[in-house]
Image: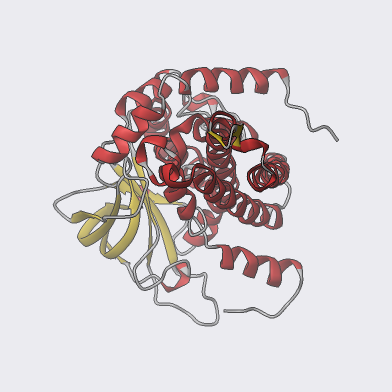
Amino acid sequence: MTFELTGEQRELRAAVRELAARFGDEYWLERDRGHEFPWEFYDAFAGAGWVGIGIPTEYGGSGLGLVEGGILLQEIAASGAGINGCTPLHLSIFGMSPVVKHGSEEMRARDLPRIASGELHVAFAVTEPDAGTDTTRITTFARRDGDDYVVSGRKVWISKAQLAEKMLLIARTAPRDEANRTAGLTLFFTAIDREHVEVREIEKLGRHAVDSNELAIRELRVPVADRIGEEGKGLTYLLDGLNPERILMAHEAIGLGRAALARAVRYANERVVFDRPIGRNQAIQFPLADALARLDAAELVARGAAWRSDNGLPCGREANTAKYLAAEACWLAADRAVQTLGGMGYAAEYHVERYFREARLLRIAPVSQELALSYLGEHVLGLPRSY
């Protein structure tokens, strides 16, 4: 077993770090304040080929795995871009797994090259107001009508829907069956026809550079050709993207935590009180060192989870553990960064308050800490189902 990155992976990390460094904290502060999508950043990464890192080479991507995707997103987050910088890219990395694995050849040839180039923006339309993380309880319904499905329903917390041309959409094609709760759900990759899809932006605590939205879908016609795989098996296909999502967002959390920690360390070295830098005080130094240890530990678990996924091994345990540990470590690092800076930690110009707001999100999304623990309790420890 080796924990070292390969030469190619080290080159990838260095290239991403160099490109991300062109967009400093002031850039991200302005995008966050103005609720502005980071077009310059996105175009730079798309132009360098990073948007298609996980898309097969035959469709214009790099064909790399989750280890490389994790390195990419962790470096972006650690640069100070945080989750504002990662979200525009990670939807194209993990979100397209069902299309890559289960979409028709026509769909893959039509859409994947445009996603890899960064031209086609996509959204992930799964969550609903009355279902939350229990996807089996969604009520958005797709009724078959000849060569189309007619879809009506609501979705919530849909990132990038203001910009996206297409969405990965899951809907019911049969009523919920208590005896087989995962059946009757069908997955589509289809256009967001704004005559039939009302997109309302949600005001939120952080990550303001990338929109979050509620969708009201009314009689949206979706061609049968936009269906992924077989009717009724959509949740199975969707699950192909969920463990990768948790693994990649664990890497984002680690990067964000490192950004917050770097700011705190710099301030602790520069800030002098009572004729000594505050970083000499154990009350400052030890909490930051503890945050470092927790980030390092979470990174090992996240990297191991990515390796297992890339090698076709079961990784539900590792993916949930990585997401849980990374989110906790990130939150702790961001909180201690604010505490280290004291009053200035509350000031936007020092940036850690932005990291703090984004770190809070990672304890909720893409799955709550409680549900990650619930998975481990039931599927690893063998305890009774808790919900």
Residue nearer the viewer, 281 or 191: 281
Q: Residue at x 56, y 30 (%)?
A: 266
Quadrant of the image for the C terminus? Answer: bottom right
Q: Please, is residue 334 above or below residue 371 in the view? A: above
Left or right of 122 on screen, residue 18: right
Q: From where the camera sits, is residue 148 visible? A: no
Q: Please, is residue 127 above or below residue 268 in the view? A: below
Left or right of 88 on screen, residue 74: right
Residue nearer the viewer, 205 or 57: 205
Q: From where the camera sits, is residue 362 visible? A: yes
Quadrant of the image occupied by residue 317:
bottom right
Outermost residue to the front: 274
Q: Where does the image place residue 102, in percent across and percent down from the top left?
A: 51, 47
Outermost residue to the right: 1
Left or right of 83 on screen, residue 31: left
Q: Where does the image place residue 287, in percent across and percent down from the top left?
A: 66, 48
Residue nearer the viewer, 146 or 313: 313
Q: Where does the image place residue 112, in percent across and percent down from the top left?
A: 42, 33
